[in-house]
Amino acid sequence: MNDIELIEKLCNSCGASGFEDEVLAVAREYLKGIADFEEDSMRNLYIYPKYNKGNRPYILLDAHSDEVGFMVQAIKPDGTLRFIPIGGWNEKCLPSSKVQICAKTGHILGVIAAGSPHLMTAEQRNAPVSYDNLVIDIGATSVEEASSFGVEIGLPVVPLTPFVFDEKHGVLHGKAFDDRMGVAALLKCIKNLQKCALPQDIVGVISSQEEVGERGITAAMHRLKPTAAICFEGCPADDTSAPSYMIQDALKGGVMLRHMDATVICTPRFTEFARQVAASKNIKVQMAVRRGGGNNGAYIISANGGTPVIVAGIPVRYIHTFNCIAVKEDFDSVVSLGEELCKSLTEEVVKGF
């Protein structure tokens, strides 16, 4: 499959935190014959390329498979569903949004109900959005009818936002770009490296449950002992929300190399090395310093007595909402930088970090 087909399959997959199986199936399909796989009980997928020489130190490539979503909490007498968030949402975007409930029998379509203005009081119109007064409506009229649709307490729910690629302008629209764009970049990087002479082996992990506290990578790092790690991420673009002098993650700006966020100071010498490699290969990068946010790098950097780590981000507008926007050229830049780093990270270079 080509890049766009890969991204489309990943983004359209149902993969709320803890329920990432559909995403991992796409990854296995894409690297079939190129890599061997292992999976743990947390749904972390470990990728071991067949071109590795073995018995060598290795670089870790990480991206997380999960997306922010919801979980069915209860079925109300009128057939609508109470639900709670999985991960952090911009709640203002929720009313009137289409969702899919990932049931054992298939995906059940629904909508997060928004009251008709004809039936709303002034108090209801001005009330803040709250999970206490939001429901998912699947068109059922009773508990029994909702159950006949296949609804059960505990089922995951994700946005119903079909992926669309505007080929003329290179613009991608869809859901879950955090972090399915990163997963796609990791997979393509591993595939492309099969024809390269590498100074160290490569191991990939598509980690679970990042959106609820980086739980998957925390477990994975008990198994993994890389010399260094690259986190491929879909990161919040700020080019439509920040003043010009503060824009650090813009569409068409290339790879976002993050110095720090609320959880991690990425390894400074590794970050600088990545910037130099990008400059030598004419790969666009943009440097970012964040007060908030977080990513798997925080848990990688403190594992095994300290593991050098960088974050290679793809700018994504409107992450943690139902409709994300990114561009293909930034995806290509992240893949290119990942490949060049894997070809450049000798043991001696890593020891200098």
Image (spheres, rainbow, N blue to C red):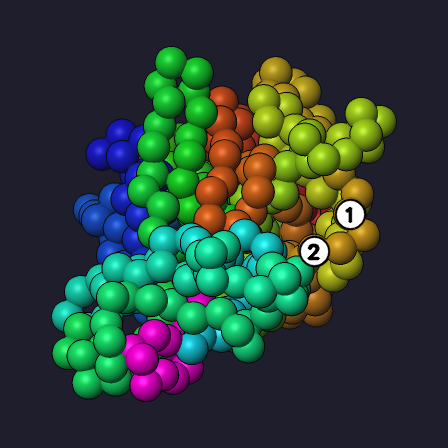
Determine crowd level at label 2: few under 14, some 14-19, many 20+ residues with C-alpha closer than 10 A.
few
Extreme residue in the right direction: 245
Tell me which residue sits at (42%, 62%) in the image. 113
Looking at the rendered image, the quarter that the N terminus falls into is top left
Q: Which of 37 and 23 is in front in this view?
A: 23
- Any part of residue 329 in sight: yes
**Label 1 amino acid?**
Arg
* Residue 330: x %, y % from top left: 53, 27
**Label 2 amino acid?**
Gly
Q: Which residues make up the magenta segment?
A: 70-81
Dividing the picture into quadrants, the one containing residue 318 is top right
* Residue 270: x %, y % from top left: 71, 42
Determine crowd level at label 1: few under 14, some 14-19, many 20+ residues with C-alpha closer than 10 A.
some
Q: Nearer the viewer, residue 200 or 251?
A: 251
Q: Distance between the residues labelled 1 and 2?
A: 7 Å
- The image shows residue 80, relative to residue 195, as above or below, that is below
The residue pinned by badge 2 equals: 293
- The image shows residue 276, relative to residue 269, as above or below, that is above
Q: In the drawing, does residue 323 fall left or right of residue 47?
A: right
Q: Does the magenta stretch include residue 3?
A: no
Q: Mark 1 and 2 residues: CB-CB less than 8 Å, in contact?
A: yes
* Residue 315: x %, y % from top left: 59, 35
Q: In the drawing, does residue 134 fall left or right of residue 42?
A: right
The residue pinned by badge 1 equals: 290
Q: Residue 8: give its label.
A: none
- The image shows residue 296, relative to residue 166, as above or below, that is below
- Any part of residue 346 in sight: no
Local SS, label 2: loop
